[in-house]
Image (spheres, rainbow, N blue to C red):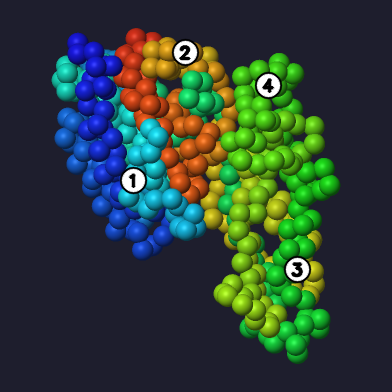
Amino acid sequence: MFQHDLFVRNYSQRFVNELKDFVRIPSVSSQPKHAPDVKRCAGWLANHLRQIGLENVRVIDTPRHPIVYADWLHAAAGPTLLVYGHYDVQPVEPLDEWRTSPFEPTVRDQNLYGRGACDDKGQLFAHVKAIEFYLRNSRRLPVNVKCLFEGEEEVGSPNLKPFIARERRALGCDTVVMSDTRMLGSDRPAITYALRGALSLELEVKGASGDLHSGNYGGALHNPLQALCGIIARLHDSRGRIAVPGLYDRVRCWSRRERGYMAHFGPSDKEILRHAQAIRGWGEHGFTLYERTTIRPALNVTGITGGHQGVGGKSIVPARAVAKIDIRLVPDQEPAQIEQLFREQVCRLTPVTVRSEVRTFFRTKPALVNREHPAMRAALAAYRHGFGVAPVFVRSGGSIPVVNEFQELLGAPTILMGFALPDDRIHAPNEKFHLPNFFKGIETSIAFLREIAQGVPTERQPYTIELR
């Protein structure tokens, strides 16, 4: 067989150019003005999957953004691997903090800069190129493969779960693989085995029916913006714990052995602060920064608006103020239960002089993957081949909604093979993807397909998908 390291070297520039074309499409799923771009990106990806030799390629409409599906199911009774990724991206604001245009991908110092270069187009593309290696050079894959790429991950995947539930037979697989997580460093590969859940909320505080003159009403009426800030200030206690009664009732107390493993193999406080370009940490006492972002829940205010936002002053008492709230959850917390506890606490903290309302955007459960699963061992071997060293197991503070859905609906574990670096500035201005990681990621994915063919038992039979 054609050597895969030679394959990557020979075609590396083409791969980068193709990735640039992929990143160039502004597939921002949260902004309605980009809905045509998200659809165009789905079409571009589907066309590329056809070009490399995948079959049954479909662009499937949903009530919001399309799902892209493709497969190759000729590995007889071999295992079936579902490759998942997302082609939608985060908004680019603040635009003035980008060194180069976010949708004009640029290479500097072995990094490809652009929105979505790392999250998740570049990481997704590593698996696509691995599939291309086998189909180009032997015209077959070592396993049955189904590709499922969505355009709504950055808005909570609202249409993916119903799709998986409806098509669970067609999507049946033994293992899922996705690359949407981080390594510890360029020479420190890692497999993520735990994710936090997420609860995305909006808290609005209202006062009068409209903005009022601050000279006539300031000091006489409660300012909703001030009231909102007062509520937010009371959502944490002096030791950094979330001040919502009942929120910690189901939080696991991890063993000394587990916390010791995390301390040995995970990032140190110093490393986390360096990657964040911050001076000091903050949070719940008694836990390292790594533990605070993985095995402990967190409540973050991700945005706040109210009153005059333009240049100069304006003498008003604003009629309303809004805060965006992001709560990260850990096993065994249930998002719906935590949401109810938060609503009750907001009700208790809201002064009688104003009104408050909580709106929910999405809920995501935390996830925990068995480190002893055969597919995990296949991933370990694949990383040794692609990166030259064995990976370590790490927890992530992030959330990926579909991981639990694959487990619950398909009965398949998800192997999280990240190729991102801690300083790739995911979701921030100047997002990048380290190109050596892209190339090593391709080699790792090639090896994973080979290893998974040898090490994952299956009772499933491949069949052609019939998507409605």
At 38% from the left and 39% from the top, the residue drawn is 108
At 17% from the left and 23% from the top, the residue drawn is 136
- Residue furthest bottom as drawn: 216
User: Compared with residue 86, is residue 133 higher up or lower down, i.e. above or below?
Assistant: above
User: Compared with residue 387, is residue 430 higher up or lower down, i.e. above or below?
Assistant: below
Residue at the disc numbered 1: 105
How far apart are labels 1 and 3 at the CA level? 43 Å
Identify residue type, mark 4: Ala
Q: Nearer the viewer, mark 1 or mark 4?
A: 1
Residue at the disc numbered 3: 227
Q: Secondary structure at mark 1?
A: loop
- Judge the density around disc 2: few (<14), some (14-19), many (≥20) Cα neighbours within 10 Å: some
- Residue sitting nearer the eye, 299 or 73: 299
At 61% from the left and 77% from the top, the residue drawn is 312
Q: Cβ–Cβ below 8 Å for labels 1 and 2?
A: no
User: Compared with residue 369, is residue 45 higher up or lower down, i.e. above or below?
Assistant: below
Looking at marks 2 and 3 on the same chain, the residue that comes earlier in the sequence is marked by 3
**Residue 190 in sight from this viewpoint:** yes
Please identify the quadrant where the C terminus is shown: top left
Residue at the disc numbered 2: 389
Q: Nearer the viewer, mark 2 or mark 3?
A: 2
How far apart are labels 2 and 3 at the CA level? 53 Å
Looking at marks 1 and 4 on the same chain, the residue that comes earlier in the sequence is marked by 1
Identify residue type, mark 1: Pro
Q: Nearer the viewer, mark 1 or mark 2?
A: 1
Looking at marks 4 and 3 on the same chain, the residue that comes earlier in the sequence is marked by 3
How far apart are labels 2 and 4 at the CA level? 20 Å
Looking at marks 1 and 2 on the same chain, the residue that comes earlier in the sequence is marked by 1
User: Compared with residue 96, is residue 260 higher up or lower down, i.e. above or below?
Assistant: above
How far apart are labels 4 and 3 at the CA level? 40 Å
